[in-house]
Each structure stands twice: as C-alpha cells, then as structure tokens.
Image: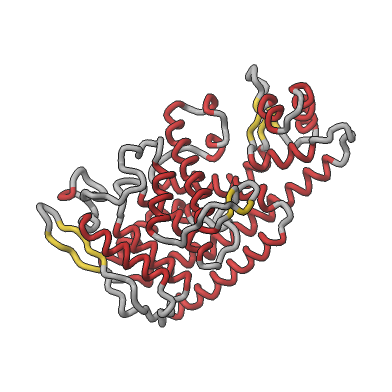
Amino acid sequence: MNNFQAGHYVQCSGYKAFIPSKINKEFICNDSKILALLEKASRYIGELNAYSKNLPNIFFFLSMMAIDEATFSNKIEGTRITLNEVVSPDEEILPERRDEKTEVLNYLYALSLSYKTLTGYENILISPEKANDPTLPFCTRLIKKAHKYLLEGSRGKDKHPGEFRKSQNWIGGTMPSTAAFVPPPPELLNELLADFENFWHNDEIYVPILIKIAICHYQFETIHPFLDGNGRIGRLILLLQLVDSGLLELPTLYLSKYFERNRKQYYDALSLVREKNNINQWIQYFLEGVCDTALLSVNLLKDIDNLNNECEEKLQGIPRSHINANKLLKNLYLYPQTSTNKISKQLNIEYQNANNLLKTFVKLGILEVNSKRRNKIYTFKKYLDIFNKAQLK
C-alpha cells in the first residue's frame, strides 16, 4: 500500500507523542504476496466455517476454545497462568495466580457479552439462544462495554473500566519521557476513534475485509484509548469484527495464540508501521496468522470430534442404569475438571449416583482422578491435552 502514511510525532511537555493519520479512506494493495495470502486466508476461514457448521456438538467445544484464547491473550500481557490452572478450583492453584485467573475469566465474560450485544445471541459459548435485549453494531460504545466487563474486579479495576482515558498513557519506561512509545494525547481520541469507526462501516471504499481488520487493529493499538487493557481489548475486537463482517459464523478463530507464539514479531510489526509507514509487512504478518490459526482451529475441532466419538463408543458398553452418562460427557467439555459435589449439583442427581458415575468414567479411561486429596478431583485430561498440544505451523 504505497499511499499509507502512519502519522507523525508532536512535541508535548518533555516528550513526543505519536498522532496516527486518519484511516477512513481508500487503500490500494498491489502486493502480490499479500493478495495471495488474502485468498488463502479467506479460503481457510471458509473451510473452518463449513467444518464448524457440520459438527454436531460444536457448542460444547466453543467454551474451551474461548478459555484457551483468553489464557493466551492475557499471557501476551505477562501473566503466567496455564489453561489447566484456569479450569482448576481456586484452592488448587497458587494464590498469586488467582488474580490472573480472574483476568482470564473476565476476558471470557467480555467476549460472551460482547457477542450477545453484537449478534443478539446469548450463551454462545455454551448453548446459544436468541436474547430479547437490544443489539449494537460494531462501534466504540460496544468496545467500551467490553472493556468494562474486562477490567471490573481485576487488577485494572482502578483504571476507569469502560471509559476512554482522559490522561496521557505510554508504553514502556516509567514516564512519557522515557517511554518506548507514547500514544496520542487524550483530547484527540474522540476524533481518531470516530474515524476508526467510520472506516469500519464505510461501504463506499473497497478494502478487503481481512485487510480492513488488520488496519483497524494497528490503528486501535496505536491510539491506545484506555488506561489499561488495550492489548486484550484489541485482540477481542478482532473476533467481533470477523463476526460482524460475516466472515466468521461462530467464535472459532482466535489469534492470540499466534501473537503470543510470535510475540516479538507482533510488536515489531506494529512498530514498523509507525516507523517506516510499512503497513504491508503488518498485513502480511496478520494474514499469515489468520491462515495458521484457521488451519489450527480445524485440526483442533477434528481432534475433539474424534475424542468425542471415542468416548461415546465407550459409553455404549455401560449399563443402561447410567442414564446420565451422556449428560456427564457433555458437561465435561464445559468443565473438564470436576468433583462429585459439582456433578451432583450440575446434573441434579444424588451424591452417590454422581460418585458412581465418575468412577465408571475413570474405569473407562475417560477421566483421571487425583486420589491424593480428600475431595477427589476428576480431570478430562485427554481433552485438555488436545489444547495444550495444539501447535501452530
């Protein structure tokens, strides 16, 4: 994109802040590598949509895919909590990880409620149903709502959740004068964010949707409109835009694992746009991530479907008295670490029946049990292993 100008620096009191150029205009891309990647990424997303649509139990798997995304999105910001710890009871994880778990669960909550606000479907990660609440198109109001859900009750709760900043922030260093990057001053946010929103909804410019999303992500992270949580919200916005554009039918494509695995390239690619006006390398990096992640998601869903078929086959050999066996299996996709008390409450069955059912699942090799504890914890390890072993190209 030869006509892309990233912006310019302005001198402030003791530091320079970067003012991004407005993006609500036509961009022409003649880069053959980007065009080839664009075609490939669109094809892979189409394959992911088709596979997801034809998978009978897809809604039982969406929750863990979102938890995996939330874990990696927070990991980019420096958290160390693992997927296994996120699904574990609080008493099973280190005290210093519990705040991090709250942040991961907040991300999940923000994702679910933002999806509902955007599409009108609630409980999308568990059992979707049409809600009666009013919806919003993709806009800054929706972004602020998502940010409010993300930060409330977490370590960023004092950073004005759901409000655009009214003071200067910065990235790296202890103050703006020593920072690695200083975003635009707060008085320019309304104008820049209006331009950001208008660009997304402008149907009179012919920029391919995936390229539009890539430009939006760069612009949002450069504006950095919140005092905290900009990275996590920026990555959550990617999913919302994929859904809002109609490219993605269900929340099955998450890029945080790709960004986290290639963290240095992620930050370098964003910085290089500002330093050299080189948006092409960022778009290329982004499209490569879409390709890799879409392929990973299809393979992940295939592995989960194979595991589900294997487990269902094992259940066919147990006595009919275990009428809740299929209910328990579906429950495990939502809660892969559980206990007798939890199953008793969740399936609304007697404690002893829940205990016998869990023991049967252990004998069948579906569950593993930690018998060292007085209150036994049962783990659907094969399911968690699929996510832990999932690797990008």
The residue sitting at the left extreme is: 13
Q: Nearer the viewer, residue 8 or 59?
A: 59
> Image point 50% across, 73% down: which residue?
37
* Position of residue 29 measured from the top left corner of the image (x, y, whole percent): 40, 80
Choose top left, top right, bottom left or bottom right for residue 120.
bottom right
Question: Of all residues shown, which one is farthest toward the top?
Answer: 374
Q: How many marks?
A: 0
Residue 300 found in image quarter: bottom right
The quadrant the N terminus occupies is: bottom left
Q: Give whichever of 357, 283 is nearer the camera.
A: 357
In percent of width and height, residue 59 lies at: 66, 51
Residue 266 percent location from the top left of the image? 39, 58
Residue 221 located left or right of residue 286: left
- In this orientation, does residue 393 appear? no
User: Could you say which quadrant of the image residue 352 lies in?
Assistant: top right
Residue at the spot x=88%, y=39% of the render? Answer: 317
Judged left or right of residue 227, residue 384 is right
Specify how the rendered protein is coloured.
secondary structure
The image shows residue 86, relative to residue 339, as above or below, that is below
Q: Is residue 231 visible?
A: yes
> Taking 150 as reference, is 279 above or below it?
below
Q: Quadrant of the C terminus?
A: bottom right
Q: Is residue 121 left or right of residue 57?
A: left
Q: Position of residue 379 (x, y in %)?
A: 66, 33
Residue at (79%, 35%) from the top-left corner? 324
